[in-house]
């Protein structure tokens, strides 16, 4: 995973993920975000379903 130098102190790296656009998935590059108080970032993942896999986007928990 490529993670560039943080642009400011305490920046949190949010890894790239797959995003549904139109009728297919496209990859969105990672980026830095400001940390959220009392939250952690949960990285996106592929979730198995009865009809195949779907992408669950990352979120702050």
Image (cartoon, rainbow, N blue to C red):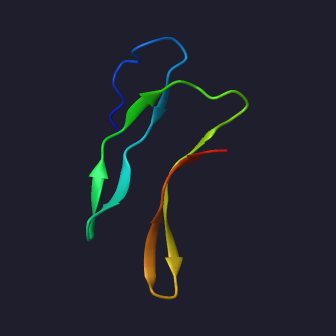
Where is residue 12? Give x, y as percent.
Answer: 51, 27
Up/down of 17 relative to 1, above or below: below
Q: Quadrant of the C terminus?
A: top right
| Residue occupying the point 69% across, 27% down | 37
Where is residue 11? Give x, y as percent.
Answer: 50, 21
Up/down of 14 relative to 18, above or below: above
Q: Quadrant of residue 30?
A: top left
Q: Residue furthest front?
A: 22
Where is residue 54? Give x, y as percent.
Answer: 45, 71
Where is residue 22? Give x, y as percent.
Answer: 26, 66
Q: Give the total of numbered labels.
A: 0
| Residue occupying the point 29% across, 53% down | 27
| Residue occupying the point 36% across, 56% down | 18
- In terms of depth relative to the viewer, which is nearer, 2 or 26? 26
Q: Quadrant of the N terminus?
A: top left
Would residue 12 be found to the left or right of residue 28 on screen?
Answer: right
Q: Residue furthest top?
A: 9
Would residue 17 be found to the left or right of residue 40 on screen?
Answer: left
Would residue 31 be found to the left or right of residue 21 on screen?
Answer: right
Q: Residue furthest right?
A: 38
């Amino acid at each position: 995973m490529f993670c560039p130098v943080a642009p400011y102190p305490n920046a949190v790296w949010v890894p790239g993920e797959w995003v549904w656009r139109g009728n297919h998935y496209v990859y969105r590059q990672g980026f830095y975000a400001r940390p959220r108080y009392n939250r952690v970032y949960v990285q996106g993942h592929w979730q198995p379903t009865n009809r195949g896999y779907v992408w669950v986007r990352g979120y702050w928990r």
